[in-house]
Image: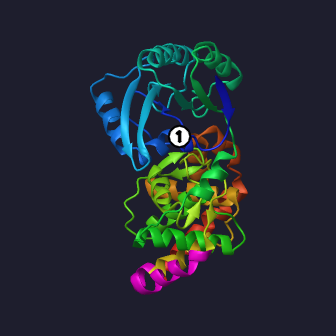
């Protein structure tokens, strides 16, 4: 018997839970990240199996996790090879064949599974759903299928209650995001990356590695920093899959705590850097302007002082997107802003 529902799969009242995984030992986003955090022993066995090259599409890894509510069977179901690749319908087919055999062999009475391969895997749910019904619908066990549901993030946000310890780097980034919102803009991964890039450029040793990315300088470490604050100081990274411009909801009830930390735990130079950051992005807070300013600053950081025509040339070499947005007048304005800001800092 197959039941369809939506919500948080980890809340399912079934004997077994199906976890969609890749075969390289990474549980970095989506439902797999939730499994990693809630079932650490399962993750350890999964990672070990991947190191030994024992996991492949069509081969399941079954573990038992001891929880406060009793034992839970976890069925790790490969839907990808590499974490960054898309899934394949043949992987789903092979996995469902193995899953049906497992049910018949072990006598599992009930299980919950996600929309296999349809999230980051990129598969079409209209094609995957009939495959599930074909392989599992006749087995006489309770199968609870969690359909794709955009509302699951809102559900997780209501459930997610964490505590997070502030550090200088975390407090500075949060302070910068709160200040950015105070000026009328919204916090996002895009904004956080640009603010962190500028903070580091102003001398704060954040130890972040930035690369030339689609929307300007980007560091994957920024998302990791914010993820550790999620559920305490912000919302929106519950499955670590927010889009670059998707709004992150800052928890304003804890803004005063961040401000106290800044005033009492940061040194005078760190507080001065936060003030300089506000001055640096003044007039460039809109998405286009902020991306342009950060991209030009990144080019200058990599190659030194350059005239505007050379900056334009580097922008056009960066990517087709940068080539399209490299308006000569806007580049000139941003370049002059960086020059004037640098001169003020040198005189301070």
Residue 169: image x %, image y %?
Answer: 42, 68
- The part of the image, by quadrant, that contains residue 287 is bottom right
Q: Is residue 312 visible?
A: yes
- Above or below, 125 against 248 in this view is above
Q: Residue at x 32, y 22 (%)?
A: 54
In this view of the protein, which residue sits in the foreground, 347 or 47?
Answer: 47
In this view of the protein, which residue sits in the foreground, 4 or 204?
Answer: 4
Magenta segment boundaries in residue numbering = 253-270
Residue 193 shown in magenta: no
- Above or below, 127 against 84 in this view is above
- The part of the image, by quadrant, that contains residue 140 is top right
Q: Residue at x 51, y 73 (%)?
A: 342
Q: Is residue 279 visible?
A: no
Secondary structure of the residue carrying tag 1 is helix
Q: Which residue is mark 1?
A: 31
Quarter holding the N terminus? Answer: top right
Residue 13: image x %, image y %?
Answer: 55, 40
- Figure colour scheme: rainbow
Query: Majority secondary structure of the magenta segment?
Result: helix
């Amino acid at each position: 018997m197959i039941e369809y529902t939506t919500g948080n799969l980890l809340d399912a009242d079934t004997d077994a839970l199906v976890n969609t995984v890749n075969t390289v030992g990474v549980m970095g986003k989506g439902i797999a990240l939730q499994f990693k955090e809630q079932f650490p022993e399962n993750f350890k066995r999964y990672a070990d199996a991947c190191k030994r090259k024992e996991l492949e599409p069509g081969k399941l890894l079954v573990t038992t996790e001891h929880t406060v509510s009793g034992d839970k069977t976890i069925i790790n179901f490969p839907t990808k090879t590499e974490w960054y690749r898309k899934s394949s319908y043949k992987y789903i087919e092979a996995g469902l064949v193995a899953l049906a055999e497992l049910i018949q062999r072990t006598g599992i009475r009930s299980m919950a599974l996600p929309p296999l391969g349809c999230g980051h895997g990129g598969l079409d749910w209209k094609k995957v759903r009939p495959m599930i019904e074909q392989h599992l619908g006749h087995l006489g066990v309770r199968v609870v299928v969690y359909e794709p549901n955009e509302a699951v993030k809102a559900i997780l946000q209501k459930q997610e209650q964490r505590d997070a310890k502030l550090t200088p780097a975390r407090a500075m980034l949060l302070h910068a995001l709160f200040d950015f919102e105070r000026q009328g803009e919204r916090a996002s991964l895009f904004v956080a990356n640009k603010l962190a890039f500028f903070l580091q450029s102003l001398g704060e040793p954040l130890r972040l590695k930035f690369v030339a990315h689609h929307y300007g300088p980007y560091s994957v470490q920024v998302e990791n920093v914010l993820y550790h604050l999620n559920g305490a100081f912000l919302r929106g990274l519950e499955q670590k899959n927010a889009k670059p411009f998707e709004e992150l909801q800052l928890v304003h009830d804890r803004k005063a705590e961040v401000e106290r930390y800044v005033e009492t735990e940061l040194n005078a130079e760190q507080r001065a850097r936060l003030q300089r950051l506000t001055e640096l992005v003044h007039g460039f807070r809109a998405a286009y302007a902020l991306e342009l300013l950060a991209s030009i600053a990144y080019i200058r950081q990599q190659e030194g002082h350059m005239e505007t025509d050379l900056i334009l040339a580097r922008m056009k070499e960066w990517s087709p997107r940068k080539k399209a947005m490299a308006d000569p007048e806007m580049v000139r304005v941003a370049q002059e802003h960086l020059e004037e800001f640098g001169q003020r800092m040198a005189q301070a």
